[in-house]
Amino acid sequence: MLIMLLGPPGAGKGTQAEFLVKNYNLAYISTGEILRSAVKKGTPLGLKAKQYMEEGQLVPDDVVVGIVKERLADPDCRQGALLDGFPRTVAQAQSLDQVLNDLGCKLDAVIHMAVEEEELIARLTGRRVCRDCGATYHIKFNPPKVRNVCDQCGGELSQREDDSLATVTERLAVYKKQTEPLIDYYRQQNLLHTIDGNQDIDAIAAQISAVLDKLSQ
Ligand code: ADP
Ligand code: AMP
C-alpha cells in the first residue's frame, strides 16, 4: 500500500502519520523531516536546503525528488509506505509517477486533509515538537501530560523555527500557489479522498482508516 497525505502546513499530516504507520505497518517518508535532520547534522543536503526552509520556500524539485527516490528503494518500503509532504509541486508529482513506474508500483490513494486557514495558523503557531523523537504536540489542542516534556520518550519539546507567524504566512501562500494544483492532478487520476481536517484528531483518524480499510479489502 502506497499512500500520500496531501494538505497545507498544519493540516495534521504528521499527527495522523504517527498513528497510520503503526496501524498499517507502513514505512514513513516525510521530506520535511528528512530535510530538518540534514540541516541539524549540517550535511551537504542540509546546507543546500537550510535557507529555503527558513524562508518558508520550497526546496528545489530535483533535490527532494532525489531524496524520495533513494528512500523508496529502502527495503522497509517494500511492505508499503506513507508519503507526508511530498509531492508538493506538479513537477514533483510527475517525477514521482516516473519513479514509481520504474519501481513497478503505483500510488493507491491520496488523502487530502482540508482545513480552514485561521485554524491552520492557530495550529502551526502553537505546535511543539520533541527534539529527540519528533513526536508532535500542540500547546492547547494536543498538550503533553507534563508541560514541555514528550509523553513518548521524555524528551524536551521545542518550537520549529519555521512556525513563527511570518514564516507560517509565507508557507501557506506557497502551498496555495505551488501545491494546491495537486488536488486536481490527483482528482483526475481518481486517487483523491478529501477528509474534513477541521475535526478532532480521533475523528479524522477514523475517517482515514475507513478509506484505507476499503482499499485493502
Ligand atoms: P502538518 O504535518 O500537516 O504540518 P501537524 O500534524 O504537525 O501538521 O499538526 C500541526 C499542529 O496542529 C500540531 O501542533 C498538532 O498537534 C495540531 N493538530 C493536529 N491535528 C489536529 C486536529 N485535528 N485538531 C487540532 N489540532 C491538531
Ligand atoms: P514540512 O515538515 O512538510 O512542513 O516541511 C518543512 C519544509 O521543508 C518546507 O517548508 C519546505 O521548505 C521543505 N520541504 C519539505 N517537503 C518538501 C517538498 N516536497 N518540496 C520542497 N520542499 C519541501
Image (spheres, rainbow, N blue to C red):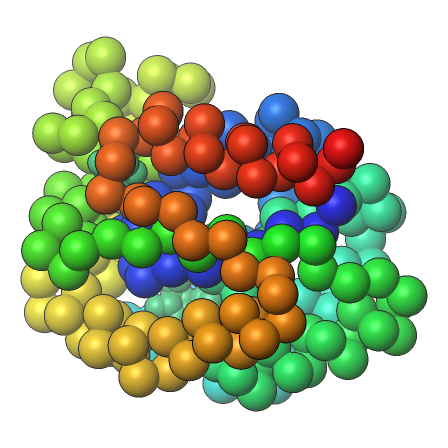
Q: Quadrant of ligand 1?
A: top left
Q: Residue at x 70, y 60 (%)?
A: 107
Residue 197, given in percent of the width and then of the height, sits at 30, 45
Residue 176 location in percent, x, y? 28, 77
Residue visible at 24% across and 53% down?
Answer: 115
Q: Is residue 206 above or below residue 28?
A: above
Along the line of sight, the residue nearer the viewer: 130 or 14:
14
Q: Quadrant of the C terminus?
A: top right
Which quadrant would residue 131 be assigned to in this image?
top left
Near-viewer residue (144 or 49): 144
| In-image side of 42 versus 58 (left or right) | right
Residue 32 is situated, as x and y percent measured from the top left of the image, at 46, 60
Residue visible at 13% across and 49% down in the picture: 119
Q: Nearer the viewer, residue 173 or 198?
A: 198
State whether residue 166 is above or below residue 9.
Answer: below
User: In the figure, is residue 15 to the left or right of 118?
Assistant: right
Answer whether residue 102 is visible to the viewer in this image.
yes
Q: Residue at left 90%, top 66%?
A: 104
